[in-house]
Amino acid sequence: MKLQISLLALLVAGTAFAGTTPGLLVLKEGHSGFVPPQYAYSLKCEVYADYATKQKTTGETSETATDVKETVYTAAVPNAKAAIALSKLAAKGKIVESNGPTDGPTSTYVGVVEGAVVDSHVKLYFNYSSTRYRNSVEKAVKALTEFADANCALE
């Protein structure tokens, strides 16, 4: 645990003053839905240019584990610039919504476009048992959700 925190501190310190280093690229969250406490989980994963952090909480005791690892790029998202370009493309899309049954697990994917003062969070895909939405820019959604999944496996 100390090693993971030290690694995160080094990564943050190494990039804090770089100026051109992109910040958060993609955010993924997941929750188990309505299940017995021993089966409950939640996941929050943030993917940056050089590293990804994953926080997973499980079970009745709400034990939390945090993991930091090097960012894994995919064929569709070969680097941070590609992720940023896809998020900007998705920002031009519309949200398409549909309804479904209730009380199941959720998955949320969000692309991030850095702003001068505040970052914009771009909705990419949300799957909840009663509502689903997806961004209409399919190319961006597919590439960025696969990129998030490559870095944020539930395990």
Image (cartoon, rainbow, N blue to C red):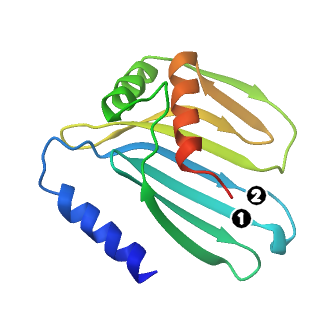
Q: Can residue 82 be seen by looking at this rendering?
A: yes
Give the image location of residue 134, x and y in percent.
62, 26
Which numbered circle lies on residue 14?
Answer: none
> Helix or strand or loop: what does disc 2 sit on?
loop
Give the image location of residue 74, x and y in percent.
49, 33
Is residue 2 toward the left or the right of residue 9 in the image? right
Q: Residue 9 lies in what quarter of the image?
A: bottom left
Q: Earlier in the sequence, mark 2 or mark 1?
A: 2
Q: Nearer the viewer, residue 92 or 76?
A: 76
Give the residue type that dot 1 points to: Tyr
Q: Can residue 137 be seen by looking at this rendering?
A: no
Distance Cα–Cα, label 2 vs label 1: 5 Å
96 vs 149: above or below:
above
Residue at image x 56%, y 43%?
Answer: 150
> Helix or strand or loop: what does disc 1 sit on?
strand
Residue that mark 2 sits on:
32
Determine contact: label 2, label 1, CB under 8 Å: yes
Which numbered circle lies on residue 41?
Answer: 1
Q: Residue 26 lies in what quarter of the image?
A: top left
38 vs 16: above or below:
below
Is residue 91 toward the left or the right of residue 21 in the image? right
Give the residue type that dot 2 points to: Ser
**Which image quarter is the C terminus in?**
bottom right
Residue at image x 41%, y 24%?
Answer: 86
Residue at image x 77%, y 79%?
Answer: 60
Residue at image x 83%, y 74%?
Answer: 38
Give the image location of residue 135, x and y in percent.
57, 23
Callout 1 environment at 10 Å: few (<14), some (14 to 19), or many (20+)? many
